[in-house]
Image (spheres, helix red, strand yellow):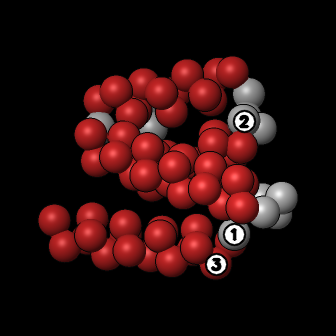
Amino acid sequence: MLTCKDFLHELSDYLDESIDAELRLKLEKHMAECPNCWVIADTTRRTVQIYKGMDPVPIPTDVERRLMVAIEKKMAARK
Ligand SMILES: [Zn+2]
């Protein structure tokens, strides 16, 4: 079973469509069971699409890193 941390770790590859089918299924299963990660994935996907529309450069690592920090803080606060 995938944890939220695993999910976030694989998210950029998932959105990049550069992961194998087995891992993709695991991530999709996690999203189906975890509304929190679903929202994160959906938001990130939109962000990436906006960036791709503006510029040919792939996912900006700076944005991704800041997003990860924000998510981890949010999740730590819930516990
Ligand atoms: Zn999750």
CA separation in Å, label 1 and label 3: 5 Å
* Numbered circle sitting on residue 60: 1
N-terminal-most mark, 1 or 2: 2
Q: Amino acid at mark 3?
A: Asp
**Percent x, y for residue 51?**
66, 60
Residue found at x 78% / y 63%? 55
Left or right side of 22 for 67? left
Is residue 31 visible in the rendered image? The answer is: yes
Is residue 9 visible in the rendered image? The answer is: no
Q: Amino acid at mark 1?
A: Pro
Q: Amino acid at mark 2?
A: Glu
N-terminal-most mark, 2 or 3: 2
Instruction: Provide the residue designation for mark 3.
Output: 62
Q: Are marks 1 and 3 in contact (CB under 8 Å)?
A: yes
Q: Nearer the viewer, residue 18 or 75?
A: 18
**Percent x, y for residue 29?**
42, 25
| Secondary structure of the residue carrying numbered label 3 | helix
**Percent x, y for residue 39?**
34, 46
In which quadrant will I find the N terminus? top left
CA separation in Å, label 2 and label 3: 20 Å
Residue found at x 70% / y 53%? 53
Query: Seen from this angle, which residue lies furthest right?
Result: 56
Graded by Cα atoms within 10 Å as few (under 14), some (14 to 19) or many (20 or more), the crowding at tag 2 reads few
* Numbered circle sitting on residue 17: 2
